[in-house]
């Protein structure tokens, strides 16, 4: 049996309850969700070594960072855990470059790689107070990466940003996920973020793991339903393959091989990597192929699952020929009228104008 990359078996007494989390994480991003006060931030602080009264065992790649039974409790600076708090936590008296260098142990290669990944080289001579919220988050991410962490902890990195900034920062998070291949715990209240960045989801409720698994399979978990009601977006990474100026559209091929037509975006050159976003309520579900539909993007699919999220139902559709998945939000009445059920063949449609580049 191989040793899990990250082993977590931690307890911590909080004011309202005892935080008790036991789980194992593989590489990739694990989202952590749950209502306010569920213990999400406390869990990250315990892993980072910022909660000295934490009990139990924490190990990465078989090496113990905390093992109460063996008397092991490494201080934060020896854990090689990158932590990005909600407020970015930049040092106001240091330049961007010095912030990124802080804690990097003179590892110039790691500093340069982090700067290039987050594309903050034009910012290196500035100070934090001169940066926008999105720029501060990118610098904070770069600083965490420059330490060459074995584990990355992100505490709601987009929560303080307005929707426009949030959409512009999300691709940077995807870039970090893909380029650095780090195990990462990502606290969020946004279901769309969890679906976009994470392959695993842990749901906390009153300090306990209520559920865990593939994010789409947990949309109806009680601690997630409220966030799911607030909106779910499909995020589709891909590359621009063509512009049709006369027709007013740009064609994008997603990483799963589906071609998607969006509103003309000539500012994105052919070959450019982009991430498309479309809200689940803007995905139409058809029980039969409809002729003469104005929506340019129509895909045959099968229903993989139906998840009740508050008053609505989220239809999880798997596109034919390995074209990926789309989530559509419909009413229970629509489910009944269309006779939707798992394995039912459907067609999923999206208007070009409902799809945007993030």
Image (spheres, rainbow, N blue to C red):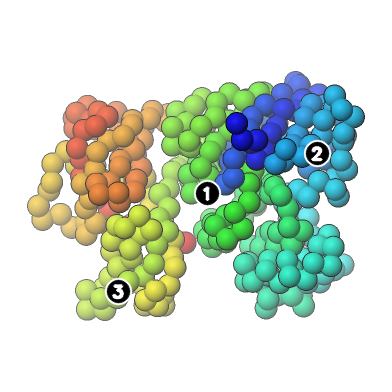
Q: Position of residue 244 (x, y in %)?
A: 25, 76
Disc 2 to disc 3, how far (Cα)? 50 Å
Are the residues tagged 3 and 1 within 8 Å (C-beta)?
no
Label 1: which residue? 197
The Cα–Cα distance between marks 1 and 2, rounded to whole angstroms, is 26 Å
Query: Residue 264: x percent and y percent?
Result: 32, 72
Q: From this viewpoint, which residue is outermost toward the front? A: 1
Of all residues, the one furthest to the top in this rendering is 17
| Residue occupying the point 33% across, 63% down | 253
Sooner in the amino-acid sequence: mark 3 or mark 1: 1
Viewer-side label of 1, 2: 2
Which residue is disc 3 drawn over? 242
Which image quadrant for residue 273?
bottom left
Please state which of residues 11 and 110 is positioned toward the viewer in this rendering: 110
Q: From the top left corner, tell me how far across and down residue 24 is, in percent.
A: 63, 33
Mark 2, residue position: 65
């Amino acid at each position: 049996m191989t040793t899990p990359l990250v082993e977590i078996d931690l307890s911590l007494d909080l004011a309202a309850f005892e935080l008790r989390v036991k789980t194992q994480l593989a590489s990739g991003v694990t989202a952590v969700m749950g209502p306010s006060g569920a213990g999400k931030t406390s869990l990250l602080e315990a892993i980072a070594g910022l909660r000295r009264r934490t009990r139990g065992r924490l190990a990465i790649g078989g090496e113990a960072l905390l093992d109460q039974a063996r008397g092991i409790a490494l201080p934060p600076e020896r854990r090689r855990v990158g932590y990005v708090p909600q407020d970015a936590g930049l040092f106001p008296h240091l330049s961007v470059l010095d912030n990124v260098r802080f804690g990097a142990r003179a590892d110039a290669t790691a500093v340069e790689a982090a700067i290039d990944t987050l594309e903050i080289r034009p910012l290196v001579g500035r100070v934090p107070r001169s940066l926008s919220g999105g720029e501060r988050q990118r610098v904070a991410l770069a600083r965490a990466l420059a330490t060459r962490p074995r584990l990355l902890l992100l505490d709601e990195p987009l929560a303080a940003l307005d929707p426009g900034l949030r959409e512009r920062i999300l691709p940077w998070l995807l870039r970090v996920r893909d380029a650095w291949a780090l195990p990462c715990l990502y606290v969020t209240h946004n279901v769309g973020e969890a679906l976009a960045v994470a392959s695993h989801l842990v749901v906390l409720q009153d300090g306990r793991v209520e559920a865990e698994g593939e994010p789409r399979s947990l949309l109806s978990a009680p601690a997630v339903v409220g966030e799911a009601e607030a909106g779910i977006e499909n995020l589709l990474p891909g590359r621009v393959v063509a512009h049709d100026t006369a027709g007013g559209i740009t064609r994008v091929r997603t990483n799963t091989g589906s071609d998607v037509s969006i509103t003309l975006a000539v500012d994105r050159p052919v070959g450019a990597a982009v991430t498309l976003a479309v809200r689940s309520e803007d995905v139409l579900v058809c029980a039969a192929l409809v002729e003469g539909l104005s929506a340019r993007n129509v895909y045959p699919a099968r229903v993989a699952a139906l998840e009740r999220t508050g008053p609505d139902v989220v239809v999880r559709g798997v596109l034919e020929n390995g074209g990926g998945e789309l989530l559509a939000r419909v009413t229970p009445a629509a489910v009944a009228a269309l006779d939707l059920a798992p394995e039912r063949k459907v067609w999923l449609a999206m208007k070009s104008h409902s799809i945007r580049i993030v």
